[in-house]
Image (spheres, helix red, strand yellow):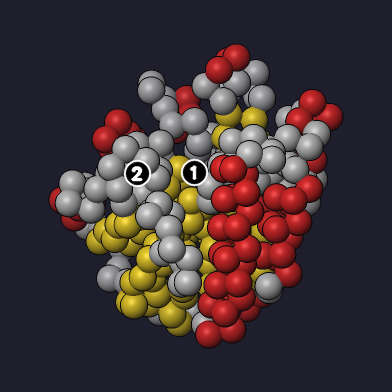
Amino acid sequence: MKIATWNVNSLNVRLDHVIDWIKAHNPDVLCLQETKQTNEKFSHEAFKAIGYKSYHNGQRTYNGVALISNKGLLDVGNDLPGFDDPQKRIIHGAYPSEELGPIRVVSAYVPNGQVVGSEKFKYKLSWLRKFNHWVKKLNSDNKHVILTGDFNIAPCDIDCHDPEGWLGSILVSPDERDLFNDVIDCGFIDSFRFLNKDLQKFSWWDYRMAGFRRNLGMRIDHILISESLKGNLSTAYIDEDPRKLERPSDHTPVISEFR
């Protein structure tokens, strides 16, 4: 089984990139963030044409999350229970795996936060606290859970190209990292770091300052798996090739495979 996550930074611009990537890699589930499409205008037909079912929680211009699956998902839901928020940042559904049984898959787009101490930063922390409360219950209610998405957090110094230069800044601040670790403490494993203890790889590079060419990146996109799936995890990696395309997203796919 192959699960992937990708912040595509607008499907309107990069639908061809996504379709080509699916054809080349055949994921069982591809989780998307920043689709920047409304539900009415989502690209369902394009995914249907290549044999995939699609589920979307979106809005105009900003945010938007989706699940693209080679099987129909069960019990699809969106938004955080008890958190009144017009921003579309969550979608989840149960994937009917023949080998492992139902797996609850989540596509999440965590708020960026902009600047430490700002109102947007406070919103990010509030959102993460509610998210953590929800995933703890999700993990207790489901045998297998996979949390994917753009978390907008680099968990450790190895996940940042310049830890000293970014010290205390957005994406790496102690408050953000503490809340990321709270998710892990709910019974989850960072699949990439679990299998690649000392490997420095990034999933996002700023468009500015030739960030990708100079490898000035961060690992802020993650696939977190419940402890129950640890023994089934076979590989976890980051595919940098889509970042090399013309007019790419500033993020690139993160993949985990299970046996």
Viewed as shown, does residue 123 lie left or right of 74? right
Estimate the x, y position of residue 46 in percent, counting from the top left. 19, 47
Q: In front here: 60 or 236?
A: 60
Which label number is shown at residue 253?
1
Q: In front here: 168 or 32?
A: 168
Kindly check if marks 2 and 1 are in contact, taking CB atoms under 8 A apart as contact.
no
Looking at the image, which residue is at 18% across and 46% down? 41
Looking at the image, which residue is at 64% across and 30% down? 217
Q: Name the residue furthest right.
A: 164
Identified by mark 2, the residue type is: Thr
CA separation, marks 2 and 1?
14 Å
Q: Counting residues from the N terminus, which is met first, the one under dot 2 or under dot 1?
A: 2
Nearer to us of marks 2 and 1 is 2
Whether 256 is drawn above or below 8: the answer is below
Residue 218 occupies which quadrant of the picture?
top right
Which label number is shown at residue 35?
2
Which label number is shown at residue 243?
none
Whether 163 is drawn above or below 152: the answer is above
Looking at the figure, which quarter contains the C terminus? bottom right
Q: Name the residue furthest front.
A: 119
For label 1, the SS is loop
Looking at the image, which residue is at 52% across and 21% down? 207
Identified by mark 1, the residue type is: Pro
Q: Is residue 7 visible?
A: yes
Density class for disc 2 (Cα within 10 Å; few <14, some 14-19, many ≥20) is many
Density class for disc 1 (Cα within 10 Å; few <14, some 14-19, many ≥20) is many
Q: Is residue 20 visible?
A: no
Estimate the x, y position of residue 8 in percent, counting from the top left. 40, 39
